[in-house]
Image (tube, rainbow, N blue to C red):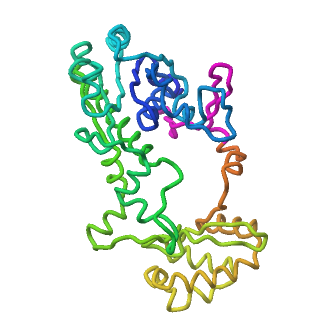
Amino acid sequence: MNLSKCFEGLTVIELANVLAGPAAGMFFAELGANVIKIENSTTDGDMTRKWKLPSEDKNSNISAYYCSVNWNKKVQLLNLKKKNDQKIVHDLIAKADIVISNYKPGKAEELRMDYSTISVINPQIIYAHISGFGEESSRTAFDVVLQAETGFMSMNGQPNGPPTKMPVALIDVLAAHQLKEGILVGLLQRSKTGRGSYICSSLYNSAIASLANQATNWLMANHIPTRLGSTHPNISPYGEIVTTKDNQKLVLAIGTNKQFVELCKIIGRIDLSKKDDFSTNEKRVLNREKLLVEIIISLRKIDSQFFIENCIKNDVPCGFVKNLKQVFETPEAAKTTLNETIKNQPTSRVKTVAFEIKECL
């Protein structure tokens, strides 16, 4: 099935800026929808246009950050405080299917871009709104603040280091997923009822919903996660970084006793699997540091290619620690990029759609 035609004929009006809302808009653009992005002409557009690396062209009006979530959109720079510009957008919305916004409380009403106004213009519209700390809060919500206030930073980093944010604006990415899932449910409901709907999500709720097993560790076992680097509170050796004889760094992800036994065979240390301290996962978690020392010593005598090939062959999860240059040199990652020329400037980003739909035979 050609995914680029899935939403052909669907029109999305994107009133959102920064990352979460535009990422949801780009999802629909990748699947063939006509996405019209409205940007504020009084600020020279989306603020992320100015979020440039020192190596980027200072004279360009786009940044790599902006390009990451704004592929294949038709951009209009308008001042929505002007009635004429409001009318332009209202006319677009009258023929649209979805509106995506991220206004602070009261701002959408001021600009006449709120659901009450728009649903009169188009009763079938799916209006999707993303907020930071909930619809009643006017607090500015950038990703790192959400990572701090929802527990992510307290868990992330090295044991003796400070709380650390993740290097991707992950809360925005998670919120974009929640928003587009809500939109898809709204579209499904509309196909049954013929009526539009108001969809809302927040960065805060999206972050809390993504705490997964760490939240349950607290809710069920009163366990407050501490910073463990890349390691795992429930499994060992899982997340440990090791270095091979040829100075390649790899990460281990041992989830079962069988995998641990196979690892011990590969590194020539079957004796480790027979020691009482390492005989079960629970004991390996308790004796994590002692076990890691033994593994490090053994792997320093083994080349990475021999190790990785034998791990794959024997179903032992592990992988190379790669930088982004190494990642995008692989043919698999190279297939995930989307290119576009914007005002004579070549741009590139990764797809936000990471699934395929196979046709039934």
| Relative depth, front residue between 143 and 195 | 143
| Relative depth, front residue between 23 and 105 | 105
Q: In this view, does 218 lie to the left or right of 17?
A: left
Q: Classify 125 as above or below 361.
A: above
Residue drawn at (43%, 16%) of the image: 78
Q: Is residue 152 left or right of residue 66?
A: left
> At which x and y percent is residue 320?
66, 61
Residue 359 highlighted magenta (yes or no): yes
Residue drawn at (43%, 81%) of the image: 282
Residue 337 highlighted magenta (yes or no): yes
Q: In this view, does 293 lie to the left or right of 234?
A: right
> At which x and y percent is residue 155?
42, 65
Residue, far bottom: 276
Q: Classify 193 as above or below 146.
A: above
State the extent of the magenta-drawn residues as a range. Answer: 334-361
Q: Classify 156 as above or below 289.
A: above
Residue drawn at (41%, 24%) of the image: 14
> At which x and y percent is residue 180?
38, 35
